[in-house]
Image (cartoon, rainbow, N blue to C red):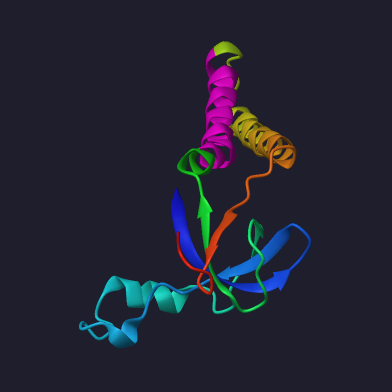
Amino acid sequence: MLLEWARVVAVEREMVWVVPEPVIDCASCLSNGGCGLSLFAGLRRQRPVAVVAVAGLPVVVNDRVVVGIPHGQLLTGVCHTLILPLLAMLVAALVAELWLGWSEAWVAFAASLGLSGGFGWARLHGAGNPRQPVLLRCSSKPVN
């Protein structure tokens, strides 16, 4: 299971909105910002992104919590959102070129249709099967 520390920003019925805590702390590092992480830290968004997690514990706003997502769930999500659309694009391009004998412009059009169809399928398939992180523990509670 992948674990990440986060801060609770809103509490709803069964859901909790959390903001992941920043991982990079260049002030305490001995290289004084001379590494690649400091460069990428400056390029990323300054506004944190809130994520919805399933609340398994009673928490309040500003609690520090550990949020987890199973490895299998993460890999399934990556396959559905990235790999399957790319495979659909490749299959559409191969069918257009090898079986149908289309010209290069039409093969590119078929590939873009395959990619769009793959993303559409991923969106429809993902809507009925939500993958959400789970709240595992709160820092104010004793760790089991």
> Residue 34 magenta-drawn?
no
Q: Is residue 83 above or below residue 70?
A: above
Image x and y of residue 9, in percent: 66, 74
Q: Is residue 3 left or right of residue 27?
A: right
- Residue at image position (45%, 48%) is 1
Residue found at the far right of this picture: 13
> Residue 79 magenta-drawn?
yes
Q: Nearer the viewer, residue 99 or 144?
A: 144
- Residue at image position (43%, 79%) is 42
Task: Inspect this view and state whether residue 104 appears.
Answer: no
Q: Main secondary structure of the magenta part?
A: helix
Q: Is residue 45 above or below residue 83?
A: below
Within the image, what quadrant is residue 126 found in?
Answer: top right
Q: Is residue 31 left or right of residue 105?
A: left
Residue found at the far left of this picture: 30
Q: Which residues are magenta?
A: 76-98
- Residue at image position (79%, 61%) is 13
Image x and y of residue 37, in percent: 33, 72
Q: Nearer the viewer, residue 72 or 104?
A: 72
